[in-house]
Amino acid sequence: MTLKKDDAIKAIMSDFEDFANLVLHQLDLLETLISTGETQFPKEQSKELYDNENKLDKLEVKISDKIINTITLYQPVASDIRKIMACYRIIISLERVGDMVINVLRFVESIKTPKVYTELSEVVSNMLIQSANMVNKSLLAFTNDDKDYAIWTIKNDAVVDELNRKMLKKAIKKSTSSNDDKELLLSFINMNSMVTTIERIADQATNIAEAAIYSIEGKDIRHKDLK
């Protein structure tokens, strides 16, 4: 029974690694597209993002089923349960990150005044890089039982928030000069939605880091301030 339980947990973690790596690839691909400053992306790369999102959806269901079956069939010990439940929490956050990648892509493609995006794309790109780095570090915290990476991720959430504020200040300053331009206004709305979505990616990285600490120490630090 113990060997079967161990094999089941290894299978979960193997699928989890594939899932996490695919999400990180999605973030890397999106960052490459954002960094060009263009609002129209090559069809092949856009298609890859959408195809990968479908893979993520199927893999999320597969891992969730394996987690439920493992707990039901093998009644793992407390430390294993903690690891598995942390994994489940992280899967949920990663699935949301995957959705947000597609949302950002759609926001960019909906911008009607490319000049607005080009002028602010560097800020957006920096935000995305920071958020992706947070996701990566939070995953390393979980897979390597590294609490320091988890704490770094949680504390760096404020950095992305500050980048968001700077982005909004730039947008407001520019929008006041062209109040009658409907397309310009719509572009700013899309930019604001895009920035907010990227900030939420960072929020999900924080959720992953909190799950990692739960896995490492058995402490649930959600809704608590780190000292």
Image: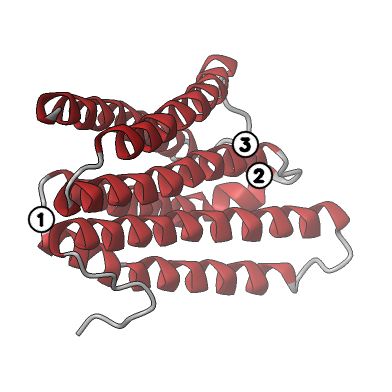
Q: Cα distance, mark 1 to mark 3?
A: 38 Å
Kind of residue indicated by mark 3:
Thr
**Secondary structure beneath disc 3?**
loop
- Res 137 visible: no
Q: Residue type at mark 1: give it.
A: Asp
Q: Which residue is mark 1?
A: 146
- Pick whichever, 54 or 61, lies toward us: 61
User: Which residue appears farthest toward the top when viewing the image?
Assistant: 44
Q: Which residue is mark 3?
A: 39
Residue 227 x %, y %: 19, 85
- Residue 51 lies, with reference to residue 157, above or below; the image says above
Q: Say if 27 sits above or below 129 in the image.
A: above
Residue at the location (64% across, 61% down)? 192
* Apparent side of residue 130 relative to residue 150 in the rendered image (left or right): right
Q: What distance separates the C-alpha of mark 2 from that of mark 3?
A: 9 Å
Which residue position holds label 2?
107
> For numbered disc 1, what is the local secondary structure?
loop
Q: Nearer the viewer, mark 2 or mark 3?
A: 2
* Image: 11 above or below 101: above
Looking at the image, is mark 2 or mark 3 earlier in the sequence?
Answer: 3
Looking at the image, residue 44 lies above or below residue 144 = above
Whether residue 144 is visible to the viewer of this picture, yes or no, is yes
Residue in the picture at 56% in, 53% down: 119
Identify which amino acid the numbered label 2 is placed on.
Answer: Phe
The picture quadrant where one finds residue 11 is: top left
